[in-house]
Amino acid sequence: MHFNEFQLDPLILRAVDAAGFSTPTPIQEKAIPLVLSGVDLMASAQTGTGKTAAFVLPTLHRLMQPPAKKGRGPRVLVLTPTRELAAQVDADIQKFGRSCQFTAGNIVGGVGYAPQIKLLKRPLDLLVATPGRLMDHMEQGLVDFSRLEVFILDEADRMLDMGFVPAVRKISAPMPKKRQTLLFSATLEGQVLNMAQEMLNKPERIQLAVNSRRHDDIAQHVYLADDAAHKHALLEHHLKDETLRQAVVFTRTKRRADRLATKLIRSGYKAAPLHGDMRQGARKKTIAKMKSGQVSILVATDVAARGLDIKDISHVINLDLPMVAEDYIHRIGRTGRAGATGMAASFVSLEEWELLTAIQKLTGWELPRETIPGLEARSQEPRKGSRSNAPSKKSKPNRNRRRGGRGDQGGGPSAKKKTANPGAKKAAKKRTFRRPPSKKRPRRRPASARAAN
């Protein structure tokens, strides 16, 4: 099939051709005709499959037609959970709509309010926004949905994970009932399905994303880790891999991302952090450096798990497992893109074992376990069905059995005397301390007897 068969506006088809696209992806082939027909649609597709263009192209075609109602409010609203995703959608709009006559803008957090207020006061055709900042402007009475024709929810499952569902409901409440609503998500089940049924009117359904997709182009491995120091030793080993071109290292917290990035920079790596506390300008600059090769290791929180499209990422390393199982799929999807192969390594402590179990249940397969000579874990994998996070009694610590491990950061015999955790010995003493049995106090005599003495 060719894009010409969709009967899109010639100006849009010219932009598609200039971008080097000729054959639509499966999600584009199925979604574009349905969106053009005007029906509501809920669709699931993995990241990197071209789903953004699946709704951008037919939406731009609609904007080439005269508006049904005059006014200054947007005809199309695209709601995304993060600024990065908003930037990705905006990039596709600019790429495919560069010859079209329409006005578009972004309303996202991390930037000043004044330019956005100015934008909303002018006639606008297409608006890309994140829920929080859009709600701020709505509360000030600056957003007019009276002529809205199309409402697009991108990454609806991520909206749910980030707690944006109440905000989405408030945003959609003042919209015209007669509108086209499109929902795109990695999964169409549970609460995502409930949200779709609540907001969409007799929607068509496309389901191309399958949770059990094995990602055959990505080699996935799990390494059992004893503690944070062990994880850092495993990370150091992987960063020295000769096949590593660029890597994303995922951490659970922003503070941990900052600390690790600083540590890697001091060790001579071209590293940088990426998380939600950074200003929008700083985040854009970091991603630009990653794309240009100035940064080779990105230390990120899950804010970068979706919408980060850098083709040369060869490794994804989960220093910490995600709290939400679906985020694992999006994390590893940063590598192995556009037909390339990739590697995903996850360092799992016993405390994170239930998170690993949830990931395996979601994906439908067991992730292969691996070990590195000299960096084997002392603890053992919990038995199936066991909820215990305690190390196995059969596994006795033997800190001197390996060199170059987490107790031997610098190597050499002297490092063997060091423990993996300087506070471990004190903690062990505290755990084994037992209060001696208290002696019986002598019975106190009456005051009269004491006075007699």
Image (cartoon, grey):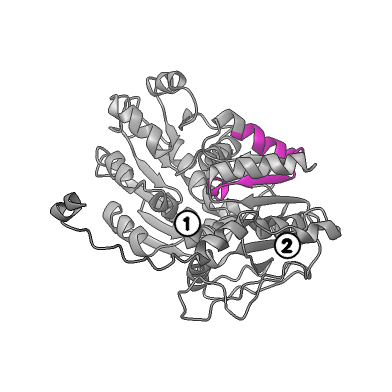
290 magenta-colored: yes
User: Picture quarter containing residue 90?
Assistant: top right
Q: Nearer the viewer, residue 341 or 440?
A: 440
Q: Which residue sits at x=29%, y=51%?
A: 199
Tell me where residue 392 appears, x and y as whole percent.
57, 77
Q: CA distance from mark 1 to mark 2?
A: 27 Å
Is 347 drawn above or below residue 286 in the view shown? below
**Residue at the extreme right of the image, as rendered:** 412
Asked if residue 291 lies left or right of residue 153, the reply is right
From where the camera sits, is residue 14 visible?
no
Mark 2 highlights which residue?
341
Mark 1 highlights which residue?
31
**Magenta region:** 283-306
Asked if residue 135 lies left or right of residue 412, the reply is left
Question: Closer to the N terminus: mark 1 or mark 2?
Answer: 1
From where the camera sits, is residue 394 visible?
yes
Tell me where residue 75 appears, x and y as whole percent.
37, 35
